[in-house]
Image (cartoon, rainbow, N blue to C red):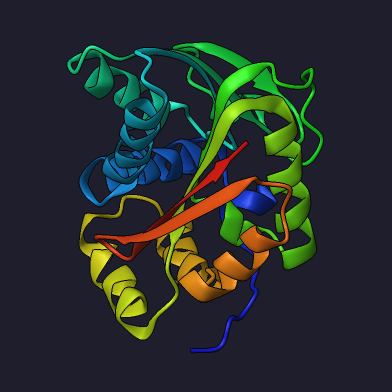
Amino acid sequence: MKRVVCQELLDSDSGTPAEVSASLRDIDRINRRFGGVSTTEAMVRRVVERVGRAEFSLLDVASGSGALPMMLRERLDRRGVKLNVTVLDRSRSHLNGTCKAVVADALSLPFADRQFDLVSCALFVHHLEPDDVARFFNEALRVARVAVVVNDLRRSYMALVAAYAGWAIIESRLSRHDGPVSIRRAYTVNELLDMLKGSRAAEVEIKEYPFFRMGAILWK
């Protein structure tokens, strides 16, 4: 399945405030039920096991409402792992005010080198073209002390079918448009791995996850 780039409506700010809020709720629901939180949790637990620590500062980039890192923090807290979360998004209107938040460009992070233990993102990389993917990885690595964790979709025909089937639980017209577009824009595991190998990461791990997700850890 060839990668096809089309504009996502949520990115274009073409919806009304009510439509944008509904689309963000859809994304939060999908992340909760279909691999968003569980994929990132699995990668952070891998970091915890390798590093042997139980407390981390985390910057979540392109965070939307910020619900995913909040759900992640709650799950890990039950396992005795503490996350101190900061979220970043390009639009203040996307953020829900539940934690420390910064409005900024993900490709030019306004933080010092090694300011956070972990930098994470979910459903963001497929929005970027390959040159900007490489730029983002290196910028995230600059800000991280330990690792960068990347959670995104895997492009396939089956994933596209699932995106259309998911309309049954989708609230927003923006989401009904953006879901299939996201699958068409997504990278395959091999494509992402090629881009990861070109980053400044000391070591890279990549793995397929349920619900057409893939996760990558870029170690410092």
Left-right relation of 95 to 33: right
Q: Check the image and name the residue furthest to the left.
A: 78
Measuring 31% from the left and 32% from the top, which residue is drawn there?
A: 45
Q: Which quadrant: the C terminus?
A: top right
Looking at this view, is 210 or 162 the one in front?
210
Left-right relation of 93 to 112: left
Give the percent coordinates (x, y) of residue 86.
Answer: 55, 17
Measuring 35% from the left and 39% from the top, which residue is drawn there?
A: 28
Give the percent coordinates (x, y) of residue 35.
Answer: 28, 50
Measuring 30% from the left and 81% from the top, which residue is drawn there?
A: 158
As drawn, 93 above or below 10: above
Numbered marks: total: 0
State the image quarter where residue 7 is shown. bottom right
Residue 14 in sight here: no
Residue 164 in sight here: yes
Give the percent coordinates (x, y) of residue 199.
Answer: 72, 53
As drawn, 120 above or below 34: above
As drawn, 108 above or below 78: below
State the image quarter where residue 194 is shown. bottom right
Looking at this view, is 126 or 197 the one in front?
197
Q: Check the image and name the residue furthest to the bottom.
A: 1
Looking at this view, is 207 or 163 the one in front?
207
Measuring 44% from the left and 12% from the top, which residue is drawn there?
A: 98
